[in-house]
Amino acid sequence: MIRTRFAPSPTGYLHIGGVRTALFSWLYAKKLGGEFILRIEDTDLERSTEESVNAILEGMSWLELDYDQGPFYQTHRFERYKEVIDQLLANGHAYYCYATPEELDEMREAQKAAGEKPRYDGRFRNFDGTPPAGVQPVIRFKNPTDGEVVIEDMVKGRVVIANKELDDLVIARSDGTPTYNLTVVVDDWDMGVTHVIRGDDHLNNTPRQINLYKAMGAPLPKFAHIPMVLGEDGSRLSKRHGAVSVLQYKEQGFLPEALLNYLVRLGWSHGDQEIFSIDEMIEHFDLNNVNSAPSTFNAGKLLWINEQHFKVAKKEHLSRHLAPFMAELGCDLSQGPDLANVAHLLRDRAKTFMEMAQAAVYFYQDFESFEEGAAKKHLRLVAAEPLQLLLNKLEAVQEWQAEPIHAAINAAAEELGVGMGKVGMPLRVAITGGGQSPAIDATAELIGKPRCIARLQMALTYIAARGEGE
Ligand code: GLU
């Protein structure tokens, strides 16, 4: 059984670069009928926060990246780590190191002065004397000193590191708490992870982890290191390039599948296809087609992809995501048409749900005044006659639907011998309050008859009050 995982550290927001690796892991498991695990790596007690854990859980749930197991918390597994560390100590793969921080600093300074790479020199590796008093030791892994570690990375290809490049890493701090490289190996082993798919910022850790697997007698998983996402200036994507937290995209009104579509295309391709449904991503995803070079984040393209998903999404799906934005704007959805129909009508005209919601307010809320520019232009004295005529005709419409509404507008224009626009534009401003809306007949249908009639009357009053002079 294929098993992949996403293992974020809850020390900040859920970064979209992290989500891209989560998505690749998720897709890989889904595609091969395997399982996907969520594991919260919260052993850094000082930097981990509950708020950040919640952001991870909320982000995963918004994106519908469902997990078959977890969330597991590393802080619940300290006993198990201790057990493994004790075993490593017992069979000679680990040892206590009593070097004080000052001593280690001195050692590094001396190495630097001699033009060497600073590294732990193994001074307690074979120590069997009396431990110095008053030092709480750390525990280090006894890394092999000869031979090499070979990573057959599914994205990067073959990576070879000589063991003499690796020093003896700390696997337990002096307070006894285990470090990242130890916990990640114990967890991936215990949880039966077969494919470790993660950011290539961890590639440096992998040879050390492979040596740990071997020392523990654990089977090696396969590794796939995914290149980083960069900002437009070529540096690693961060806050100063704009929104990097997944929840910010939720708040700005993106469809989750559009964000995933954007992220899957960052560094992965399937021919020249740009728009993918989730099912298509699962069907076509392949680690072999993941680019081994970093990719650049482009907010404009993400917006474009969101627009494309708006155009094909089911209207109920759109309305489910649009509803919170309507509430945010103070709209009571019981005071107007089915939101799904409104979303369907507006979906070609909005880049985000935030925009869509702003364009949907007049379906649910009456307004007290017309938009100034649009009113100036379209609610003039010459519009009084067409609007009055239209009002009479619309009052007589029995079946309040786009077609008869359209016929009424047509008939009014014909009777007055003017183009449709001369009737349609004043009508648009009258019933929507502004000069922009989808097709006016369909818009009027959804606004509803009583509201349209009342707003037309309001427009006529407005025109009358404006008087001759203007
Ligand atoms: N917890 C690590 C991080 O958030 C990831 C560890 C891993 O994927 O192996 O960077």
Image (cartoon, rainbow, N blue to C red):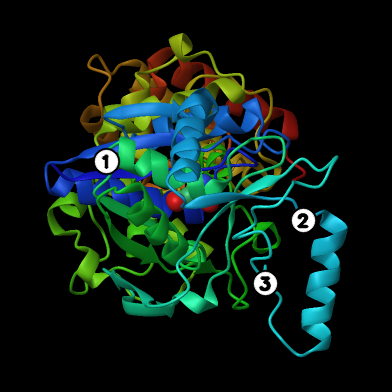
Instruction: Look at the numbered discs 3 and 2 and tell me whether their residues touch, using CB distance below 8 Å.
Output: no
Bin the neighbour count of mark 1 within 10 Å (Cα to Cα): few under 14, some 14-19, many 20 and up: some
The kind of secondary structure element at disc 3 is: loop
- Per the rendering, the mark at residue 119 is 3
Can you see residue 351? no
Find residue 116 and report its horizontal and vertical position in percent: 71, 86
Q: Is mark 1 within 8 Å of ligand 1?
A: no
Of callouts 2 and 1, which one flags the residue occurring earlier in the amino acid sequence?
2
**Vertical arrangement, residue 200 with respect to residue 349, above or below:** below
Q: Which residue is more in the foreground, 327 or 21?
A: 21
Label 2 sits on what residue type? Answer: Ala
Three-letter code, disc 3: Arg
Quadrant location, the N terminus: top left
Q: Do the CB atoms of the residues marked 3 and 1 lie less than 8 Å apart?
A: no
What residue does disc 1 label? 313
C-alpha separation, residue under disc 3 versus residue under disc 1:
55 Å
- Residue placed at 68% from the left, 48% from the top? 373
Give the CA distance from mark 2 to mark 1.
61 Å
Q: Outermost residue, bottom direction? A: 115
Residue type at tag 1: Ala
Residue under the image location 32 percent in, 26 percent down: 340
Q: Pointer 2: what residue?
A: 99
